[in-house]
Structure formats: structure tokens, C-alpha cells
Amino acid sequence: MKALVIGAGGVGSAIANIASRRSFITSMVLVDRDSARAEKSVARVNDSRFTASTVNASDISDIQRLIREVEPDVVINAVDPRFVMQIFTACENEGVTYIDMAMSLSTSEIKLGDLQFERDSAWKSKNIGALIGIGIEPGMSDIFAKYASDHLFSRIDSIAVMDGSNLVVEGFDFAPSFSIWTTIEECLNPPVIWEKGRGWYTTEPFSELETFDFPGGIGPVECVNVEHEEVILIPMKIDAGEVRFKYGLGADFINTLKTIHTLGLDRKDKVSVQGVEVSPRDLLAALLPDPATLGPHMKGSTCAGALVKGLDKSGEPKAVYIYNVVDNEWSMREYGDQAVVWQTGINPVIAMELMHKGIWNPIGVTGPEWFDAVPFLDLLPEYDSSWHIRDEATTGIIK
């Protein structure tokens, strides 16, 4: 399989690193607006199948030029969600399979992913596929929900995707382990919730604080409602009474984000600073450390999973937390990638392998829930990862 990865940041670099250990990849071109960053990531894997190039991800014509030049079987979007529609549109125009780990952005009028799903019939008419939301969250979390629906439950009353960690970045007062641009977009937008009979609706940012006891030695973490793609994707294919996403941010992180918002540093529109036009959010991102470089300074683990409640196959009450935990010391030792980007990066590579084998065959605009979860979960051990099911006698919510 020939792959083109757009974006050589933490996740894009991790994708290349993980893919270099898989024989089904015949070639991979890793591109970035910063050619030096792409070249550094390719040099790290030291594999002749991997090469670097450059592209302007905001320019559809430049992306199409690159696609025609590389002639990939699949394009993976590994840049932040601002560029989803440019890369997605270029792939549609060129008739090539598209993968991303996020979805098109929401506004006050449209939900996450709406701009992509409205193109579903066009993709089907061309007999091509877009697999959207196949990172860790969304992605593996959706696959957990699909597995629960198919194999564990006869009725699902609620699905809450619960994300938490005990990661600490030493030497920094504030250093998010993922893109600050994406973090702001997720956390400061109104959280979206799905309820059967009501549909999608939004609440206030950081609403419904509760403490969830995460496995893997992480322990209790305060979690709040956050806008996230699973809440859009899961109800499209899984019959559930309620779907929500809760993020373990912690009080200090929430207060910092609130301050960023109060000061207007989350603004995407440009302002004039002594005659120079600059986006406050882009400036903030430039001031903070690159998440890809934080691995040596990080300690702890990160956990992603789906808390599912309802009735089991025999009609008895059941609650489980299906999850994946990655320890940063392990991921740095074995791969040289910090835990959050490694945990994200394995999923599109597994999806590519399933496509290569003809097990998953996306036609139109699809999410992880569109496909059988078992082949994906069966491949996890080959990727040095794992998944677990914890019975939730007390649901894991401790206050």
C-alpha cells in the first residue's frame, strides 16, 4: 500500500514510525509545510520506503498536485482540523481514499462532520471512501462502543467516552500533550450530547463535573463534558439512549483554558499588532512547546475508553468500561514517541492494514462504527497495544 501522510507533527511522525514496522506499507510520503520537520521524521525511521516532501495544506490545488505526483492508495490527514475540508476535498477531486483522526469543524449552525457527511453521495458515486475519526478518540473509542453493541449488550442506555490521564510534564507550568489549537477547539466550544428522542443538543463548556476512577494506575480524575466527534458518530450506527464525551482535564487545566478565553487568546481571526496580522490562537500555539518534543519530560499514563451501560444479552443490567492505556515511559522507550501521539497514531495504521487486506472497505463517508470491530481489536497485540474490559459494579463514578 502506498500512503501519503499530510502533517509531520507529533501524530504524523508517530504514524510513520509505527508504519515502518509493518510490511504491508510499500511506500509512505510524509509531508509538511516545514520540509525540515518532514525530513527529520523520515530520517528517524531510517527506511528506504519512506520519503519526505512539502505541501501547503490550506491550498486545495497544491494538495491535488501532490496527490497526482505521489499517486497514493490512501491519504492520511495528520494536521489539525482547520485543514480537514481542504484535504478531504482534494481527495474527492482526485478520487483517492481519505483517512483522518478528527472531523470538519462545527459552527453555531452545523455539527462536527456535517460538511463531510453532506458529500457522502458524491463519494459513493465515485466508488471511493473516506474513513473519518479514526484516531484514539474518536477512533478506538468508537470501536469499543461498536464491540459492546455487537457482543455484550442487548440494550444500551448510555455510552460515555471517558478520557483521562495522570501525565505530568516536568519543567513546564502549562504544556498540553496534544495540539493546543485542537484542545481549545474541543474544550471551549459548547459540548454536544446525544439523547434518543431529542437528538443532538449542547451544554455549557466544562459542565457536569464528575470524578471517574481510571484504570492502569491513573486513579480518580475530574471529568467534564467536551465537544467531541464520537457523540456525532456513535448514534449514527449504534442504538443508544444517550452518548456523551467526558474529558479528564483537572481544575488547573480548566482554569487556564478559561483564562485563555477571557483574554481572547483563543480567537482564530487575525488581529493587527503594530501592522502585523496575527491570529491570537496561532500565536499561543507558537509560544507553547511542540507536543512532539515533550516525551522526555512526561511521566504517567493516558487512558481512553467507553463506559457503556444497559442490559446484557440475557436482559440483565450490565455496565462495563472498555479501554486502552499507554504508559509514556514505555512508548518513549519502545518507539521514541510520547504516549498521547503514539496512542493516536496506531489507529489509522491499523485501519490501513485492514483496508489493504480487504477486511474494511469504506465507500462513501464512513466512521469506525461502520465496520466490524473484532478484526481491528485482534490486530492490536501486533501493534504492541491492548484493550481491556472492566466490569463496573459502581460505574466508576466516585462522586
Image (tube, grey):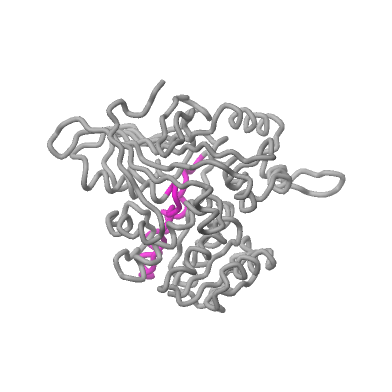
**Furthest residue in direction top, as rendered:** 399
Q: Which one is in front, 381 or 98? A: 381
The answer to whether residue 112 is magenta is yes
Residue 110 seen in the current view: yes
Q: Residue at x 55, y 78 (%)?
A: 48
Q: Position of residue 307 (x, y in %)?
A: 34, 36
Whole-percent x, y for residue 330 in the image: 50, 51
Q: Position of residue 46 (x, y in %)?
A: 58, 73
Return the x and y of residue 68 as percentages of the image width and height: 54, 77
Residue 240 as seen in the image, left or right of residue 94: left
Position above or below: 275 against 366: above
Residue 153 located left or right of residue 265: left
Q: Residue at x 58, y 55 (%)?
A: 10
Q: Quadrant of the N terminus?
A: bottom left
The reply, left or right, for residue 161 in relation to residue 299 is: left
Residue at figure coordinates x 61%, y 57% from the top left: 9
Q: Tell me the residue at 49%/28% (across/down).
A: 222
Image height check: is 206 above or below 283?
above
Comparing 197 with 194, the one in front is 194
Viewer-proximal residue among 364 and 153: 153
Please check the rendered image and state whether residue 37 is part of the magenta-colored stretch, yes or no. Answer: no
Depicted 25 relative to depicted 89: above or below: below
Q: How many numbered discs? A: 0
Left-right relation of 75 to 174:
left
Q: Inspect this view and state whether residue 61 appears.
A: no
Vertical placement of residue 289 versus 128, above or below: above
Residue nearer the viewer, 342 or 129: 342
Seen as rendered, the residue at the extreme left is 314
Quarter of the rendering occupied by the C terminus: top left
Q: Which residues are magenta?
A: 109-138
